Image: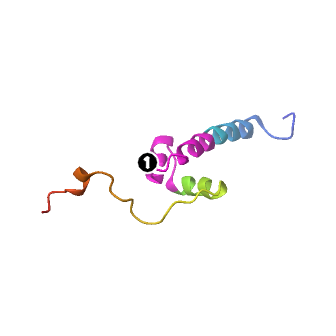
Amino acid sequence: MQDGTSTLIQAVRAVRDVIYTAVRDQLADESRTYQQIADSVGCSIATIQRIAQMEKITRPVGPKPRSTATEANDGNN
């Protein structure tokens, strides 16, 4: 405990920093949903939302628009 914090706390902070960096990098790709990011990093959607809020990253609310014609044809015609 050289700087007043235990080795365990320092290790937890280091792991958190790695996770937060990975989330920030993935948040830059607007095509990925919060759920996809949470699944890839292994944390909750609430954590992703909290990191996005800390970084002042906003996304439009609501469903994402469909990107291809094959996705639009879901067989209900």
Q: SS for tag 1? A: helix
At 24% from the left edge and 57% from the top edge, which residue is drawn?
Answer: 72
* Magenta span: chief secondary structure: helix
x%, y% of residue 69? Answer: 24, 53
In the displayed structure, would residue 43 be above or below residue 66?
above
At 22% from the left edge and 50% from the top edge, which residue is drawn?
Answer: 70
Point out the image quarter for the C terminus: bottom left
To which quarter of the image does residue 62 belong?
bottom left
x%, y% of residue 60? Answer: 49, 63
Q: Looking at the picture, which amino acid does disc 1 mark?
A: Gln
Applied colour scheme = rainbow
Question: Is 1 left, or right, of 62 in this rendering?
Answer: right
Q: Residue furthest bottom?
A: 61
Question: Is 10 left, or right, of 48 in this rendering?
Answer: right
Residues in magenta, as a range: 19-45
At 87% from the left edge and 33% from the top edge, which residue is drawn?
Answer: 2
Point out the image quarter for the N terminus: top right
> Was residue 55 drawn as part of the magenta stretch in this picture?
no
To which quarter of the image does residue 76 belong?
bottom left
> Was residue 40 drawn as part of the magenta stretch in this picture?
yes
Q: Nearer the viewer, residue 20 or 71?
A: 71
Q: Residue furthest front?
A: 69
Question: Is 46 left, or right, of 15 in this rendering?
Answer: left
Q: Nearer the viewer, residue 69 or 23?
A: 69
Label 1 crowd bin: few (<14), some (14–19), many (20+), radius 10 Å: few
Q: Residue furthest left?
A: 77
Residue pointed to by mark 1: 36
Q: How many labels sit on residues?
A: 1
At 52% from the left edge and 60% from the top edge, which residue is drawn?
Answer: 59
